[in-house]
Image: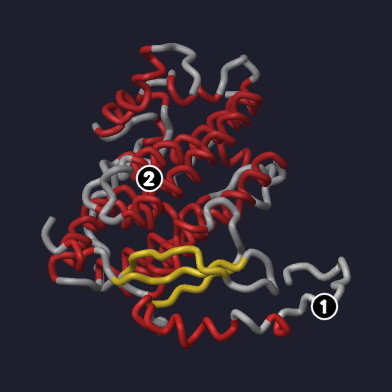
Amino acid sequence: MNKQETLFNYILRIADSQLILGHRLSEWTGHGPMLEEELASANTALDLIGQANSLYAYATQVEGKGRTEDDLAYLRSEREFFNHLLSEQPRGDFGFSMLRQMLCDAFDVLFYSALMKSSDNTLSGIAAKAYKESQYHLRHSSSWTERLGDGTEESHQRMQNSLNELWRFTDDLFAMRAADLELVNTGIAVDTSSFREAWFKQVSEVLERATLTIPTHAFMQKGSLEGRHTEHLGYLLAEMQSLHRAIPGVKW
Amino acid sequence: MENTKDSQGLVWEVFVQKKPGQPYVHCGNVHAHDAEMALQNARDVYTRRNEGNALWVLPSSEIVASSPEDLGSFFEPANDKIYRHPTFYQLPESISHM
């Protein structure tokens, strides 16, 4: 893989994660527990999909083969997506979605904060905007995690079950390709191991306030970097890509 | 729907300040179960399109309002006292938001 391909794949990893997470969140539109939360979920979903759009636009430039953002989002198959396994899990109940969101938002805040210092001006520019958005996302998802974790007996139990279900995908957040280390060395990419402890601390504090317990013996599932996903991504893509595949080149 | 009233929480009034120094203007209300949720909901519902850069929220139940019966005694006496209006002064153009 040459440097250009490495960078292309690196950008796809970030973009795919935000697109898929944004899509999952957008599934709450029309189903939110209250009007205000429905708007909040849609706002956050749009932020994430907007980040993905900017990143895809940059990826098409880096690739230089004349593909568009839509081609990347709508015309790749499951094995060609590199999003975090965490982002593709079905939305579950509202607490499940907020807990997953908190785990991802805490990652995004630290990741973007590091990517803002990238030697690649386009990436650092996208990161600077996304960082501010993620800070708010984290505040919102953390307060719901705490509210529901430390809520009623039922909400607590549901949140604990969600955490037990989701924790196994948290190693996958930090996975990196060997080739990416070259990008790290030139100051373009972020070494995810550099903020892993900070992420764990941040997440642990929220979960502690939420009176939730991190599972200690969870099997850690990985594979998204090789395009090996859980069964759920295929269904998500089938729905997300159906319009574009039925009417190629369709415009809004 | 069962328990609709409880599940939506309290009503909170939302005030948005457009720019520093300007008054907070009432713009509507939101449902929320606690103050932080009210602030976040106000942000998500009322400031998505750059409407302002500061927010107040307060429980609607804390507002003390005049009642329709107060109309005559509260407000009508001001009707014929035009000398209370500063209409006899020229305002410099540089003064805005009066």
Q: Which mark is residue A172?
A: 2
Question: Is A48 above or below relative to A194?
Answer: above
Distance of mark 1 from mark 2, alpha carbons? 72 Å
Disc 1 and disc 2 in contact, CB within 8 angstroms: no
Q: Residue at x 26, y 28 (%)?
A: A235
Q: Circle 1 sits on which residue?
A: B88
Secondary structure of the residue carrying tag 2 is helix
Residue in the picture at 60% in, 32% down: A7
- Looking at the rendered image, the quarter that the N terminus of chain B falls into is bottom left
Q: Could you tell me residue A125's position as x and y percent?
A: 68, 45
* Residue at point 65%, 41% (across, down): A123
User: Hey, what amino acid is under mark 1?
Assistant: Phe
- Expressed as whole percent of the image width and height from the top left, the position of residue A12 reads 51, 32
Residue type for callout 2: Asp
Q: Where is residue A210 in the image (x, y as percent from the top left)?
A: 29, 71
Where does the C terminus of chain B fall, quadrant-wise?
bottom right
**For residue A222, side relative to residue A122 (left or right):** left
Q: Which colour scheme is used?
A: secondary structure
Q: Seen in the image, is A84 located left or right of residue A66?
A: left
In the displayed structure, does residue A78 sit left or right of residue A193? Answer: left
Residue A245 in sight in this render: yes
Image x and y of residue A209, in percent = 32, 75
Q: Give the side of residue A145 with respect to residue B40, left or right.
A: left
Of marks 1 and 2, the one in the foreground: 1
Asked if residue A60 is positioned above or below residue A121 in the image, the reply reads above
Whether residue A177 is visible to the viewer of this picture, yes or no, is no
- Residue A194 quadrant: bottom right
Task: Please name whichever residue, A29 or B81, is drawn nearer the observer in this view of the structure.
Answer: B81
